[in-house]
Image: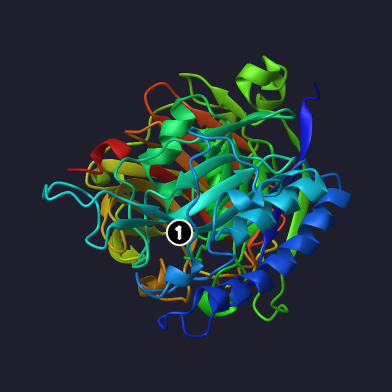
Amino acid sequence: MDSWYVAAVYEHNLILNPEPDVPLSRLDALQHMQRNLDIYEEQAAQAAQQGAQILVFPEDGLHGFNFSRSSISGYLETIPDPQQESWNPCTEPGKYNNTEVLQRLSCMARRNNLYLVANMADLQPCPLKTDPSSSCPSDGRWQFNTNVVFRSDGLLVARYHKNNLYFEQSFDTPPQPEIITFDTPFAGRFGLMICFDILFHKPTIALVEKGVRQLIFPTAWMNLLPLLDSVQFQQAFSLGANVTLLAANLRKDQYNMRGSGIYTPFSATYHHAQKGDPEEGRLLVARVPVLDPLWVGHSVTTEEGVVRSVSSSTATDSGFCQQGSCSDSPPPETASSVPPSSATFISSIDHDPFTFVLLNETEGKVNVCNGTFCCHLQYRRLPQDDSKELYALGAFAGTHTLDGRYALQVCALVRCAGLDASSCGQEVEEAESKMDFLLEGKFGTRYVYPSVLASKMVLEQPAHLETAADGRVTMKHSNMTGGLVTACLFGRMYHLDNE
């Protein structure tokens, strides 16, 4: 048993249905999906040539999006539950009618001898009960946004229905959240989720809490700077949850969809197109360490120690702190200790009201609090930096309510879009200023996702991450390769979501 495997993700420049609100016949819907499947076919062959053992395609990659409940009907196939029955669509095509897409995906896995994960639309009939508490829709069927997984011989081994929908009128939320895993002979166990799921407890954290260390993430992610760019959050999640993430996104510039990657707690292979790049697909292939603890025992734990240490003391090994010690005392919990020169102001990031303080010096320490939640920054802008860019440190603790509800505690160091304080928190893609910094917050959750995003969507692996027993998380970074766009500690307070 190797302690490595080869994974591939494909960022797909999807051929869209130009009129998704107009219902198509099954034949026309199939013709549309076959055009996308033709591209999948080429990419599966390429991935196999590069030794891939598992290949992940993005969310909505075959059919697209913006359908109504009725207009998507031609695209639906009824996917049997692999936990209930064993079926290989490639070798037993006659077993079910209207399963052309399942058959083609199954044969693709079989022909290329790899595990294949794709996303498609599932129709499940449901019992129309007179009971008003029944979750069966009035048309007597559930329609699900669904991941399917095929073994390297074409056997259907897993089916997962998306739990957290994002403005998807065509789909239903499953009656119960599904926690779905599958096992492979080369890397042990993988867990399944889709797009918006990554921000919620079920299924994502439920999988992590079950000990699943390898997660598969088809997505149709619209980038949202400064905190939720695709690759930025993909890497942050991999680091913060200490898992491998195989993330396949769509490439659709008109929806600002781009950015895919293969992430482990100590590496990132990713692609993020720039504005003006030709709009095309991208196959990423990487050699990845096996993280399934049941599979490898503890052979990889030593390597992880490079990045993270967990202790109850604070770190003192940063090269840019005075007297060699960074944070002997915890950051002040009250705003009153902040020097008056650093007046705070409110500005929003993605409609959340952050409390900010400007970084007015070339180096120094600043604190900022939002309610009782405080963030502490020690920084030094590099001397060769004569650019006039404005930076601010922001804190937010509360419930994000736009486009979905979730509770947050966030410390964010951002490059402001302009030279006016009101521009802090707006979207910025480029920066010239390099900074050495230590960013710290005391969080009420163990799920804190750290990111350092440099100019033009380049990810930087934080030099040092530390989580103390009291919830304090410290991220240190220096020697940046590009200008700093955002450094963030993104804490998810899952336990407060339903309040």
Colouring: rainbow
Front residue (pair 415, 193): 193
* Observer-nearest of 254 and 80: 80
Q: Nearer the viewer, residue 120 or 395?
A: 120
Instruction: Identify whether 256 is placed above or below 292.
Output: below
Q: 180 and 349: which one is in front?
A: 180
Quarter in which the C terminus is drawn:
top left
Residue found at the far right of this picture: 49
Instruction: Decide if residue 28 is in sight here.
Output: yes
Q: Quadrant of residue 352?
A: bottom left
* Secondary structure found at label 1: loop
Q: Amino acid at mark 1?
A: Leu
The quadrant of the image that shows the N terminus is top right
Q: Residues within 10 Å of mark 1 (few under 14, many from 20)?
A: many
Q: Residue at x 77, y 56 (%)?
A: 44
Which residue bears the numbered disc 1?
Answer: 359
Residue 418: x and y, percent? Answer: 47, 76
The answer to whether residue 91 is left or right of residue 241 is right
Q: Residue furthest top?
A: 297
Provide residue 420's location: percent of width, then percent of height.
Answer: 40, 76
**What residue is at 51 percent from the left and 37 percent from the top?**
240
Question: Which residue is rendered at x = 55% and y = 56% of the image?
Answer: 119
Above or below residue 16? Residue 156 is above
Look at the picture and state if 458 lies above or below 210.
Answer: below
Left or right for 157, reference 201: right
Q: Report the label total.
A: 1
Give residue 463's position: percent from left, percent from top.
65, 39
Camera sees residue 235: no
Left or right, 193 with respect to 454, comes to left
Residue at the image position 81 percent from the left and 52 percent from the top: 47
Residue furthest front as drawn: 94
Q: Residue 281: image x %, image y %? A: 71, 68
